[in-house]
Image (spheres, grey):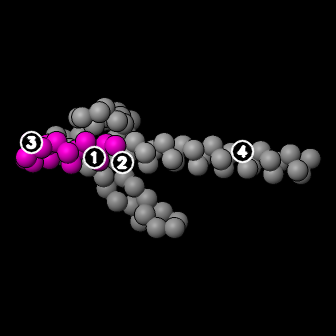
Amino acid sequence: MNNREVGPIYGVPLIQSLPLGVHGVIVQQMPSRADLVNAKNHCSNERVAAGYEVILNHYVRQCGEIAELKSQIERLKDERRD
C-alpha cells in the first residue's frame, strides 16, 4: 500500500493482507481504515477496532524483530565462511 492507512483509534499503520500458513502462500485480506471506522460506528463500543490495532501493532513489531534476527544470522553465516 503506497498511501499507508492508519487505524482510527491509536493511529497504528494498517496492513493490507496477512500471509497465512507455513509458507505464506495464502493471504487474508485485512480490514481497511474505513472498515474499522464502520465497525466502530456499528458496535456499541470501540473495543473491536482498538483491539485490532493493538494486536496488529504487536504483530508488526514481532515481524520487524524476526527480520532483524534473520539478518543477524545471515551476517554470522557470512563471517563463518570467511
Residue 34 shown left or right of residue 82 in the figure: left
Indicate the amino acid at tag 3.
Asn
Mark 2, residue position: 55
Q: Name which of mark 4 and mark 1 comes first in the sequence.
A: 1
Residue 81 in percent (x, y) is at: 89, 51
Query: Marks 1 and 2: CB-CB under 8 Å?
Result: yes
Q: Name which of mark 1 and mark 3 comes first in the sequence.
A: 3
User: Which region of the structure is painted magenta?
Assistant: 39-54
Quick one: SS at disc 1?
Answer: helix
| Residue at figure coordinates x 92%, y 47% from the top left | 82
Residue 44 shown left or right of residue 65 in the figure: left
Indicate the amino acid at tag 4.
Gln
| Mark 3 surroundings: few (<14), some (14-19) or many (≥20) residues within 10 A | few
Quick one: SS at disc 3?
Answer: helix
| Residue at figure coordinates x 68%, y 45% from the top left | 71
Of the numbered discs in the image, which one, if any, rests on residue 42? none
**Cα distance in 3D space between marks 1 and 2:** 6 Å
Residue 45 in percent (x, y) is at: 12, 43
Indicate the amino acid at tag 1.
Gly
Q: Name which of mark 3 and mark 2 comes first in the sequence.
A: 3
**Cα distance in 3D space between marks 3 and 2:** 20 Å
**Residue 15 in sight here:** no
Q: For residue 51: magenta? A: yes
| Mark 4 surroundings: few (<14), some (14-19) or many (≥20) residues within 10 A | few
Of the numbered discs in the image, which one, if any, rests on residue 72? 4
Of the numbered discs in the image, which one, if any, rests on residue 41? 3
Quick one: SS at disc 2?
Answer: helix
**Cα distance in 3D space between marks 3 and 4:** 44 Å
**Cα distance in 3D space between marks 2 and 4:** 26 Å
Quadrant of the drawing holding the N terminus: top left
